[in-house]
Amino acid sequence: MDKTKNFFIYLILFIPVTLISGPALPDLTITFASIFFLFLLFYKKNFHEIIKFNWVKLSILFWLYLIFISFFAVDIKQSLKEAFIFIRMLMIPLIIYFWIFNKDKYAKYLIIIIFLSVLFVIMDSLYQFFNYESEFGFQNDIFGFKPDFAEFNRLTGPFKDLVPGSFVSRFSFIGVLFFYIFIKKNHLKKILIVFYLSISGYICFISGERMAFVTFGLGLLIFVLFNKNNRIFFSLIFLFLFLLIFISKLFHPSYNDFKVIESSSNELGLIVIKEYPCKDKLLKKCHKKVKFQPQFIDVLKNFKNSAYGEIYLLALEMYKKNAFSGIGMNNFTNLCKNEESYKNKLQNIGCVTHPHNYYLQWLVETGPLGLLLFILYISLIVKFIINKNNNRILNLISIITILIMFWPIMSTGSLLKNWLGINTFLLLGISISLSKLSKFYQIFN
C-alpha cells in the first residue's frame, strides 16, 4: 500500500512538468491517484479525517448536485458523464493537502519542481521570442517545435497551445517560495525575487495573452502593497518590468514590422500589412496582409459585437431558457450547433465549446444554485486559508494565486477541460496546503 501511495505521490509532484507536455499525462495521473485515494479511505475507514473540513464537505455536496442537475440537462448523457468524472478535479486539493504537504520533503520537492518548471517555460519562451522572422512570425522553440499560430504574434513556448503566459502567471507566485525557503541571505533573496517576478511578468506580456498579463499585474500589485517591510524594494519589479516592455516595444520587430490598415472588435479584426526583406531581392521590401486578434481598446469600445460579447450574450440567452437547471454540463456546443434559435449567433468566431468565463459557465450549465455552490466552495477555501495560517507571506501567496485564477472579470477557459482544470485545482490544493509549510520552515517577510 505504502509503495503504491508513494508511487502516486511522485507522479503528482511532477504534474507541473507533465502539464507542459499536454493534458494526457496529468489527467491519467490524477484519475488513477484519485481512485487509489478513495480506495485507501474505504480501506482504512478514516473518512472522519477529511470530512471535518467545511470545504471538503461542500466539494462533496457540489459534486452530488452536478450529478443531480444533469438529469435536467438538454443532453443528459453528456452532462452526467462530465459531472461524474469531475470528481477527479475536486479530489486534487484533498490529495495535495493530505498526501503531499504532510511531509516536509514532498512539500519541498513540489516547490522546487514548480520553480524549475516556471524557469523552463520562461527560458523557452524567451528563446522563441527572439527567434522571430517578420515574414512568418515566431519560429521554433528550444526543442524545435514551431507554433501553429506563428503569424498571430503569439508565443507557444514549449506548449502546443497559446498558454505560456497563463502558466507563468498562475504558477510564478508559488515559485517565489523557493527563494523564501532556500535563500538565507535576506538581501540576496529580495534581489532574486525582484528579478524573477520581473521576468515572469515580461513573459506574460510578450506571450500576447492579455488576461495573463493583467491578472499577473493585479497579483504583483497586491504582493508589493502587502509586503509592508519590503514595499519600496519590491516596487522595483514594476520599474524593471516596464523597462523590459519599453525596450521590446521599441526594438523588437514583432512590434514594429507592420502597419495597421483596419482595426475592429471582430475576431482577428486587426488587419495589418507586414513588411520584410524579399528573399530573391534583399534590398527590396516585400509585403503581405496578416490578421491579428483585435486590440484590447477596440474590444472595450464595441464589446457587444466582439467575439467575447457574442459568446456572453449567447450564453445568457441559453440561460434564460433554462433558468432553473441550466443547459447541462458541456452542452454549450451541442446547443450552439443544433438548436435553430442559436445557429449563426456567433458570427465572429463560430460555435465554441464553453462560455469563456468560469462564473457564466457554471450559471449557464448548472443554474444559479450551481454557481452559488461554486462561489461558496472558493469562499470556504479562502476562509480556511486565512483562519488556518498566520504567516503573512504564505497567506499572501495563496490569496494572490487564487485571485489570479478566479478574478471574475476576464475571459477564461473551461474547468471541465483536462489541462486547465488540473492546473487550477492543483494550485487550489497548494494554496490550501501552504499553511503546513510554517511547520517545516520559518518564512518571514
Image (cartoon, rainbow, N blue to C red):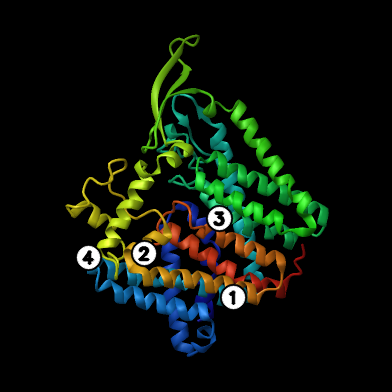
Q: Which residue is mark 3?
A: 170
The tag earlier along the polypeptide, 4 or 2, is: 4
Q: Are marks 1 and 4 in contact (CB under 8 Å)?
A: no
Residue 363's disc is 2
Q: Are marks 2 and 3 in contact (CB under 8 Å)?
A: no
Outermost residue on the left side: it is 340
The tag earlier along the polypeptide, 1 or 4, is: 4
218 versus 132 height, above or below? below
Report the amino acid beneath label 2. Answer: Leu
Residue 396 drawn at (x, y percent): 66, 63
Q: CA distance from mark 1 to mark 2?
A: 25 Å
Residue 293 drawn at (x, y percent): 42, 37
8 versus 415 height, above or below? below
Please tell me which residue lies in front, 8 or 120: 120
User: Tag 4, which secondary structure?
Assistant: loop
The tag earlier along the polypeptide, 1 or 2, is: 2
Q: CA distance from mark 2 to mark 3?
A: 24 Å
Q: Is residue 412 left or right of residue 314?
A: right
The tag earlier along the polypeptide, 1 or 3, is: 3
Residue 33 drawn at (x, y percent): 46, 72
Q: Which residue is mark 1?
A: 384
Please tell me which residue lies in front, 191 or 329: 329
Mark closer to the observer (2, 3):
2
Report the amino acid beneath label 3. Answer: Arg
Report the amino acid beneath label 4. Answer: Val
Residue 73's disc is none
Residue 25 at least partly seen: no
Residue 74's disc is 4
Q: Are marks 4 and 2 in contact (CB under 8 Å)?
A: no
Q: CA distance from mark 4 to mark 2?
A: 15 Å
